[in-house]
Image (spheres, rainbow, N blue to C red):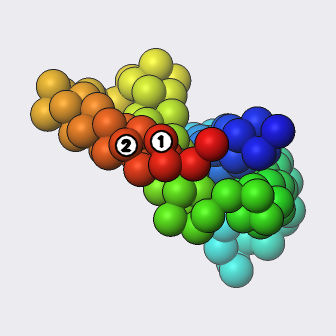
Amino acid sequence: MKWLILILGVGSNALASVLIKVAITPPFKFPSIKEPMEALLNWPLWLGLVFYGAAFLLYAAALEKLPLNVAHPILTSGTVASVALVSIFYFNESFSWVTALGILLVLSGVLLISTQVT
């Protein structure tokens, strides 16, 4: 159950990041004081904030059952890897072999760290 909570936290955090990117991509735009209604009607922005809140709560719940030095690297590296993959397919952003290698090395390190916890 502790791993499921952490994985849901990773997914929620990654989804929040993607939604914030959507919120500032046309037809949406970055909220400004000059146009307050634009900010209120920017549903990806608000949904992204909700998912960041959910990610925070899931992370806190995971910390009840997992050590910080395991939970935090998994949350951050899982989010980085997820967002990198989504950015390729959804936003058509570039993804070089160097980026892929970097993500693999980070995930390998996190895997080694997390093997100490049963």
Q: Amino acid at mark 1?
A: Thr
Which quadrant would the C terminus be assigned to in this image?
A: top right
Crowd around label 1: few <14 · some 14–19 · many ≥20 (10 Å)? few
- Residue 51 horizontal/vertical position (percent): 78, 51
Q: What residue lies at 29% left-to-right and 32% top-to-bottom?
A: 104
Residue at the extreme top of the image, as rendered: 89
In the drawing, does residue 87 fall left or right of residue 25?
Answer: left
- Is residue 21 visible in the rendered structure shown here? no
Q: What residue lies at 50% left-to-right and 28% top-to-bottom?
A: 86
For numbered disc 1, what is the local secondary structure? loop
Q: Amino acid at mark 2?
A: Leu
Callout 2–callout 1 Cβ contact below 8 Å: yes
Q: CA distance from mark 2 to mark 1?
A: 5 Å
Relative vertical location of residue 40 with respect to residue 29 in this rendering, above or below: below
Which quadrant would the N terminus be assigned to in this image?
A: top right
Relative vertical location of residue 70 with respect to residue 28 in this rendering, above or below: below
Q: Quadrant of residue 38?
A: bottom right
- Residue 58 horizontal/vertical position (percent): 79, 55
Q: Which mark is residue 112?
A: 2
- The foreground one among 116 and 19 is 116
Q: Which residue is mark 1?
A: 115
Q: Quadrant of residue 97?
A: top left
In the drawing, does residue 25 fall left or right of residue 97?
Answer: right
Q: What residue lies at 58% left-to-right and 67% top-to-bottom?
A: 68
Q: What residue lies at 53% left-to-right and 57% top-to-bottom?
A: 70
For numbered disc 2, what is the local secondary structure? helix
- Residue 45 horizontal/vertical position (percent): 73, 55
